């Protein structure tokens, strides 16, 4: 079938944002409210999915402590309320000469529902995020689960629940390692996932699966190639986190590079074999492979598009990139802006101001990343460091860290829905906590 083309309506500048994640959805919302509402430009958001879930919550979706369907944003409805258009589609290529994004066919249960098509743009913002990097390790694709998408997180949740239901009802005693979980990568995702799993296992028992003894039957292992957990964060934070993981009886293996994953467990370079029924890969990050060589745009070795300080790609004046899929330089540092939700959020806020200014012929302002610190949720508690302007780095732990951690998500929700919505939703969630199970049990 011939490609279909969606062209911008005559006259209005068409800004197309691909990827409605932590950065892209905030940008679409703000540009819709600023430009779309007053018919100063036409804004279109494209995403593979029909709903948005804030990615830092995916580890909670994976263990069932968060039923994401209660919290997700339905793109079509959100777009209508904020004066932009939404199209479902997966970007697979780019035609810079014709200024068109190439979208793969959309399928549902094996049937094509929308054919391959092209969407025309005047300005394009690529915000498609990143995925875990398995570094080509043998067996990982076949035998490990990933947490890159909502669907993958839900798949892990279902597998975990199935394993526990089977273990609870089986006649024979539980086999050694039957409920072991191995997590590769002790960065923020791996650490938070381990702590959340510890909590979920105990909650499942509380809901009646009491033939499982979490202390004896559920062993959680965290495997890290670097010398410490949270290797990218300050040492004090890493040590506090390790102490907390040890208290939760999570087995932590550091300096252990994974060389193979099998259907029985994880093999490391030192010759260690960690048996596990469920294996989750949460290490490394790269941008999607198709960005490498995308119609001549420049990328780095992890496929991120190279952008200048205004977030414009280095080889095209009409294309911008932001968030995890972009490599943005930082003055005075040889490291680019880190792939984090707070960076994507700040970049969205900047582009929401500079893209309208650019339409009026004004110069673009450079992006300056402000690190507000790192917070790690250990399920029952949190530890973290906050960057204070006057105080330098401030370490916070416990209740205060937990509150600050929750506020990151509230900030994201505020940008999307406004204050009244956030207050009402928080109230409803508090009521739900009293009336509904703490764990997704289906
Ligand atoms: C489990 C987990 C926990 C995390 N915890 C934290 C944390 O505590 N703090 C922190 O700062 N960061 C955290 N992160 C990292 C953070 O989630 C990312 O840095 C952030 O989401 C990046 O935002 P983004 O807008 O670049 O991409 P994303 O939020 O990943 O959004 C990308 C969007 O693009 C869409 N998309 C992807 N490919 C295509 C395509 N080809 N065509 C169309 N659409 C596409 C996706 O569906 C998605 O909606 C965590 C990540 C994970 C996985």
Image (cartoon, helix red, strand yellow):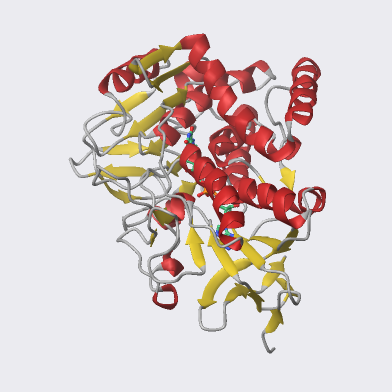
Looking at the image, which residue is at 53% across and 15% down? 380
Residue 22 coordinates in the image, percent (x, y): 57, 44
Left or right position of 48 against 421:
left
Looking at the image, which residue is at 24% across and 36% down? 226
Looking at the rendering, which quadrant does residue 44 occupy?
bottom right
Residue nearer the viewer, 397 or 78: 78
Left or right position of 157 against 69:
left
Q: Is residue 14 visible?
A: yes
Residue 224 coordinates in the image, percent (x, y): 29, 36
Q: Check the image and name the residue furthest to the bottom.
A: 2
Q: Is residue 131 visible?
A: no
Left or right position of 265 against 357:
left
Figure label count: 0
Q: Check the image and name the residue furthest to the top.
A: 399
Q: Check the image and name the residue furthest to the left.
A: 270
Residue nearer the viewer, 388 or 417: 388
Quarter in which the N terminus is drawn:
bottom right
Residue 111 coordinates in the image, percent (x, y): 73, 72
Looking at the image, which residue is at 53% across and 46% down? 350
Q: Is residue 295 above or below residue 323?
A: below
Q: Is residue 172 above or below residue 114?
A: above
Left or right position of 334 against 166:
left
Residue 255 coordinates in the image, percent (x, y): 21, 35
Q: Is residue 133 above or below residue 205?
A: below
Looking at the image, which residue is at 61% across and 71% down? 122
Quarter in which the C terminus is drawn:
top right
Residue nearer the viewer, 384 or 11: 11
């Amino acid at each position: 079938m011939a490609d279909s083309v969606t062209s911008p309506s005559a006259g209005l500048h068409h800004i197309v944002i691909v990827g409605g994640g932590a950065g892209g959805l905030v940008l679409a919302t703000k540009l819709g409210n600023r430009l779309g509402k007053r018919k100063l430009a036409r804004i279109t958001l494209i995403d593979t999915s029909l709903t948005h879930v804030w990615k830092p919550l995916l580890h909670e979706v994976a263990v069932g402590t968060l039923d994401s369907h209660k919290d997700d944003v339905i793109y079509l409805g959100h777009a209508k309320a904020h004066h932009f258009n939404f199209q479902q589609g997966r970007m697979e290529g780019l035609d810079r000469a014709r200024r068109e994004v190439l979208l793969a066919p959309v399928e549902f249960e094996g049937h094509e529902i929308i054919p391959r098509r092209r969407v025309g743009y005047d300005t394009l913002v690529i915000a498609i995020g990143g995925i875990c990097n398995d570094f080509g390790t043998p067996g990982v694709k076949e035998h490990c689960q990933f947490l890159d998408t909502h669907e993958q997180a839900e798949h892990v949740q279902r597998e975990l629940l199935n394993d526990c239901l089977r273990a609870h009802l089986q006649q024979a005693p539980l086999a050694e390692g039957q409920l072991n979980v191995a997590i590769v990568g002790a960065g923020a995702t791996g650490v938070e996932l381990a702590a959340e799993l510890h909590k979920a296992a105990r909650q499942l028992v509380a809901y009646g699966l009491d033939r499982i003894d979490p202390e004896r039957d559920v062993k959680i292992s965290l495997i890290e190639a670097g010398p410490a957990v949270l290797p990218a964060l300050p040492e004090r934070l890493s040590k506090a986190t390790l102490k907390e993981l040890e208290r939760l009886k999570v087995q932590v293996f550091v300096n252990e590079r994974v060389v193979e994953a099998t259907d029985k467990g994880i093999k490391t370079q030192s010759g260690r074999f960690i048996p596990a029924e469920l294996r989750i890969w949460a290490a490394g990050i790269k941008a999607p492979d198709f960005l490498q060589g995308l119609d001549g745009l420049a990328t780095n070795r992890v496929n991120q598009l190279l952008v200048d300080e205004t977030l414009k790609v280095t080889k095209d004046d009409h294309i911008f990139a932001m968030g995890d899929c972009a490599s943005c330089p930082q003055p005075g540092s040889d490291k680019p802006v880190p792939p984090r939700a707070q960076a994507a959020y700040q970049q969205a806020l900047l582009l929401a101001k500079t893209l309208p200014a650019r339409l009026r012929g004004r110069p673009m302002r450079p992006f300056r990343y402000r690190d507000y610190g790192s917070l790690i949720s250990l399920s029952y508690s949190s530890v973290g460091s906050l960057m204070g302007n006057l105080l330098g780095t401030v370490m916070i732990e416990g209740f205060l860290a937990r509150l600050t951690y929750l506020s990151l998500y509230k900030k994201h929700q505020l940008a999307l829905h406004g204050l009244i919505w956030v207050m009402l939703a928080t109230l409803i969630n508090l009521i739900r906590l009293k009336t509904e199970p703490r764990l997704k049990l289906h």
